[in-house]
Amino acid sequence: MTIELVGTAERTPRSREFSVLYAEVQHFYAQQLRILDAHDAGAWPDTFTEDAVFEGPQLSAPVRVRDGLTGRVRAGAARERRAGSRLDHWIGMLDVRPQADGSLRTRCSALAYVTPGGGGSRVLYVYVMEDVLVRTHGTWRTAHRRVTRDDLA
């Protein structure tokens, strides 16, 4: 059986560029979610653009990140301290689609899991996270995020 890779030779430089881009996006999400999981309400909004919008199943309507979500980050930290547990996020199945305007459309699966003090971790929710990323001041930032829960679809 012969498998022909159509256009492989002419796509090699582009493939290398995309590989670098993909790694940048993975690194961006690793940093962004580490900041969120640390409940760093000062740094987390800086991973979004000034006018970023967030849509999520826990929200009744889309909100501006800087206006509407910083307080939720602080409240999450307080809940975890009271419960003696830790909430973390993990993403996978990342799809990155460069757009003509230089932005990126991304889609990934995200797990939210809790680790109680002295206990094993368990998955709370499985999400689908769809973002528009833009490069500002030399770094990627989220301009729009839409989060849906698998169990509510």
Image (cartoon, rainbow, N blue to C red):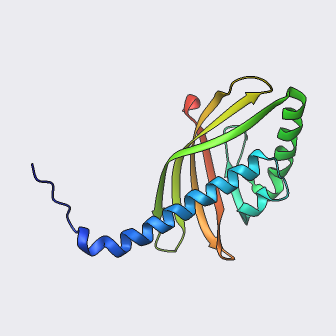
Q: Nearer the viewer, residue 95 or 5?
A: 5
Residue farthest toward the left in the current orientation of the protein: 1
Q: Is residue 99 left or right of residue 39?
A: left
- Residue 87, relative to residue 69: is it above or below? above
Vertical position of residue 11 compared to residue 68: above or below: below
In this rendering, the answer to whether 72 lies above or below 124 is below
x then y, percent, for residue 79: 86, 33
The x, y position of residue 122, in whole percent, is 65, 26
Q: Where residue 39 sits in the image (x, y, percent)? A: 82, 47
Q: Is residue 129 left or right of residue 43?
A: left
Residue at image location 65% in from the left, 61% down from the top? 142
Q: How many marks?
A: 0
Outermost top residue: 119
Residue drawn at x 74%, y 22% is 119
Residue in view at x 76 percent, y 56 percent: 65
Q: Determine whether, in the image, residue 50 is placed left or right of residue 23.
A: right
At 84% from the left and 53% from the top, the residue drawn is 41
Is the residue 122 above or below the residue 72 in the image?
A: above
* Location of residue 61 in the rendering, given as x and y in whole percent from the top left corner: 71, 45
Where the C terminus falls, by quadrant? Answer: top right
